Amino acid sequence: MQQQNQDRLRIWTEQGNVHISQLFFQQYKACGIEDDEALLILHMTAFIEKGNHFPTPDDLAERSHISKEQVSHLMQRLFQKGYLTIEQKYDDNGMLNEAFSFYSLWNRLLDSLVTEETSKEQQSQKDEEGEIFRLFEQEFGRFLSPMESETISMWFDQDQLSPELIRAALKEAVLAQKMSLRYIDRILFEWKKKNVKTLSDVEKQASQYRSAPARTTTSETTRTEKVPFYNWLEERE
């Protein structure tokens, strides 16, 4: 029994494997490839990896339940979609022969993946921006006016500010009890001047202002105390 299993394993190994990326199975639907076309691609890839770079419809029909006519039709569809091409290739004897190529298909699969990832990133960014608008309405206790919504949109689109930075500026306004977009816009403007780009930068900047001594009155008996918040609207150039 052990010898029989070893022989079966040897036969299996000698037949070789068809190497095709998992990306094909993940993305072929997104690329507009039908299931019967995908099956044909697998068969053609198997022939190519075995050294037959130009399998005929007869060769392909012999291995499947697809007729020769159907094989020809499917190949024509792949040609029309630009996924299958014919190239000239030198064999081991230096003879120039024709060969099928799926190079453009592999590139299309990669493009599809990049597009999908980009789309997910864009959707994630839109979700974050939408959350910012909801957060402003929550803190303001009302719906935003069209002008206020446009101002926030400009922070994203023109100033290229991150949601976390806008959220931090809103937090500063809440702590200072100055709930106006003008005040928040001033905070963001001052941060931009001081190259504040991350939450760590924000914390450092806020710590400096909150630990600064308050202005004293003319009375010598008045104690100097630390101010808890910084009034960004009084920032001087």
Image: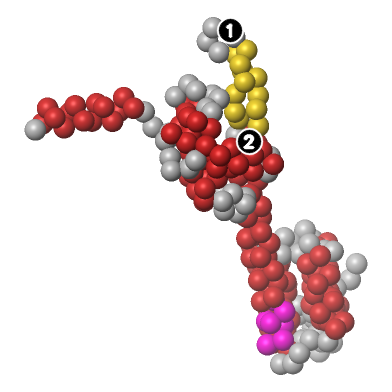
Residue 83: say if magenta: no
Q: Which residue is mark 2?
A: 84
Q: Is residue 17 visible?
A: yes
* The residue stretch that appears in magenta: 132-138
Identity of the residue drawn at 75% across and 77% down: 230
Q: Nearer the viewer, residue 23 or 79?
A: 79
Residue 40 image point, x, y percent: 51, 40
Left or right of 143, for residue 11: left
Label 1 sits on what residue type?
Gly
Is residue 23 something that shows in the picture?
no
* Relative depth, front residue between 237 and 141: 141
Which percent across, then down, holds residue 54? 55, 25
Left/right placement of residue 65 relative to residue 112 reads left
> Taking 102 as reference, is 52 above or below it?
above
Residue at the right extreme of this rendering: 237
Where, by quadrant of the figure, is residue 85 drawn? top right
Q: Quadrant of residue 180?
A: bottom right
- Residue beneath the point at 68% across and 62% down: 122
Please name whichever residue, 145 or 172, is drawn nearer the observer in this view of the structure: 145
The reply to whether discs 2 and 1 touch (Cβ–Cβ < 8 Å) is no
Question: Which quarter of the image is occupied by the C terminus?
Answer: bottom right
Magenta stretch secondary structure, dominant: helix
Q: Secondary structure at mark 2?
A: loop
Judge the density around disc 1: few (<14), some (14-19), many (≥20) Cα neighbours within 10 Å. Answer: few
Q: Is residue 197 left or right of residue 100?
A: right
Return the residue found at the far top. 93
Q: Which numbered marker is on residue 94? A: 1
Q: Amino acid at mark 2?
A: Leu
126 vs 28: above or below: below
Q: Residue at x 81, y 72 (%)?
A: 153
Quarter of the N terminus within the rendering: top left
Decide: is 231 above or below 128. Answer: below
